[in-house]
């Protein structure tokens, strides 16, 4: 797939080349897919991802995460270095992203949450989306007790038609005015569920599933990698596998012992599957504190990524590396955004 060699694009690429000298940038993707509902803007279409890679290939700046990490460890400036990372471990990372990365010969680090792969279930925010944001009929009132507090949500019209779904499926968390009642309830529930332990959250999802009259299932469009697919993903020279905990929690909400379990066990499981050391870590939701960083270092990782949107400079903390989230856009827009993400 080729990007038209327009004068406009060439000018944008020239601007990127001129501005990248002072430092580098780590890009954060989640999915390369086209799905119906994407409330967190996690998906970049395969067509647009190919265009992003074409831009990076033309620039010639894409490097491995560990190469950038080594640059920082040596006390040098990460000049003209762009790194691609993926979080969570969706199956489309293997089936859609990897073939394109190999075609353009661009490396990437993919951070995996091992618990979802072992149990083969949807990530909890995806299950919540399936229960609330898909067309169908639900009871008109949802009542839950969360952490000792009673909550009630009124859905209004119980039926959510296919037409309403199509009208609202492009709504996402970046929009300030959410007109859909179901989306408002979805985001409210997310805020209440994310600080909970995996056990508490799973119990509440069971309760929501019973309320909705739905079964526990894994959609092919939303599944995570299997253990066999992890090995397949790691084959070749372009993909590094990194750890992303077991259950994808907000780590700072957990006791230190639970944080250590999440971090060290995910590393050990991936090393068992891959047969070699796993050196890179990404904090789920970008959530960490000083104690979390210490645990990551003691576990034997050599670097860790956050979701703080910033560039990477000579003095960047190797266990708190900034990343910028990449949303769905064409190659020309992606090239323009690089000039915003890269330090001036």
Image (cartoon, helix red, strand yellow):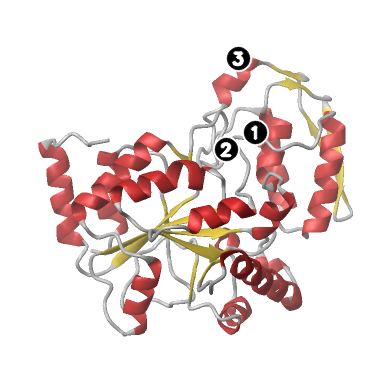
Compared to 240, does 37 lie above or below?
A: above
Labels 1 and 3: the sequence-earlier one:
3
* Residue at 37%, 83% in the rendered image: 73
- The mark found on residue 183 in the picture is 1
The residue under label 3 is 163
Report crowding for label 2: few under 14, some 14 to 19, many 20 or more residues within 10 A (C-alpha). many
Q: Assign a secondary structure to mark 3.
A: helix
Q: Which of the pair 101/315 is nearer the observer?
A: 101
Image coordinates for residue 1, horizontal then vertical, percent: 27, 35
Splitting the image into 4 quarters, where does residue 141 fall?
top right
In this rendering, position of residue 249 left or right of residue 66: right
Under tag 1, what secondary structure? helix
Q: Is residue 224 left or right of residue 255?
A: left
Mark 1 and mark 2: Cα distance apart in space: 8 Å
Tell me where residue 261 appears, x and y as whole percent: 72, 73
What residue would you read off at disc 2?
39
Q: Position of residue 94 (x, y in %)?
A: 49, 47
Q: Is residue 136 visible?
A: yes
Which residue does the image show at 69% across and 76% down from the upper left? 260
**Alpha carbons under labels 3 and 2: distance apart:** 17 Å
Q: For the residue carrying disc 1, how many other residues have a C-alpha within 10 Å: few (<14), some (14-19), or many (20+)?
A: many
Q: Residues within 10 Å of mark 3 (few under 14, many from 20)?
A: few
Q: Residue furthest left?
A: 7
């Amino acid at each position: 797939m080729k990007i038209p060699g327009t004068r406009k694009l060439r000018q944008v690429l020239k601007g990127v080349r001129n501005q990248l000298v002072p430092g580098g940038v780590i890009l954060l993707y989640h999915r390369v897919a086209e799905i119906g509902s994407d409330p967190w803007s996690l998906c970049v279409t395969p067509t647009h991802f190919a265009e992003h890679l074409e831009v990076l290939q033309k620039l010639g700046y894409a490097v491995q995460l560990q190469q950038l990490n080594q640059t920082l460890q040596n006390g040098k400036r990460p000049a003209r270095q762009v790194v691609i990372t993926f979080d969570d471990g969706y199956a489309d990372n293997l089936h859609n992203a990897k073939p394109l990365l190999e075609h353009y010969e661009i490396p990437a680090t993919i951070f995996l949450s091992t618990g979802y792969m072992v149990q083969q279930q949807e990530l909890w925010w995806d299950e919540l989306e399936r229960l609330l944001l898909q067309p169908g009929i639900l009871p008109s009132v949802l009542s839950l007790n969360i952490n000792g507090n009673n909550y009630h949500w009124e859905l209004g019209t119980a039926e959510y038609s296919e037409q309403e779904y199509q009208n609202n499926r492009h709504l996402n968390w970046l929009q300030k005015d959410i007109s859909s009642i179901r989306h408002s309830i979805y985001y409210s529930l997310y805020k209440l569920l994310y600080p909970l332990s995996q056990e508490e959250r799973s119990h509440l999802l069971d309760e929501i599933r019973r309320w909705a009259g739905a079964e526990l299932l894994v959609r092919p469009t939303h599944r995570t990698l299997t253990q066999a697919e992890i090995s397949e993903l790691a084959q070749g020279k372009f993909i590094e596998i990194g750890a992303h905990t077991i259950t994808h929690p907000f780590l700072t909400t957990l006791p230190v012992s639970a944080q250590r379990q999440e971090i060290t066990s995910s590393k050990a499981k991936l090393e068992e599957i891959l047969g070699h050391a796993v050196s890179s870590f990404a904090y789920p939701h970008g959530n960490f504190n000083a104690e979390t960083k210490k645990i990551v270092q003691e576990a034997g990782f050599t670097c860790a990524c956050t979701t703080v949107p910033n560039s990477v400079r000579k003095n960047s903390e190797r266990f708190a590396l900034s990343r910028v989230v990449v949303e769905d856009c064409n190659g020309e827009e992606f090239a323009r955004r690089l000039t915003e993400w890269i330090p001036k």
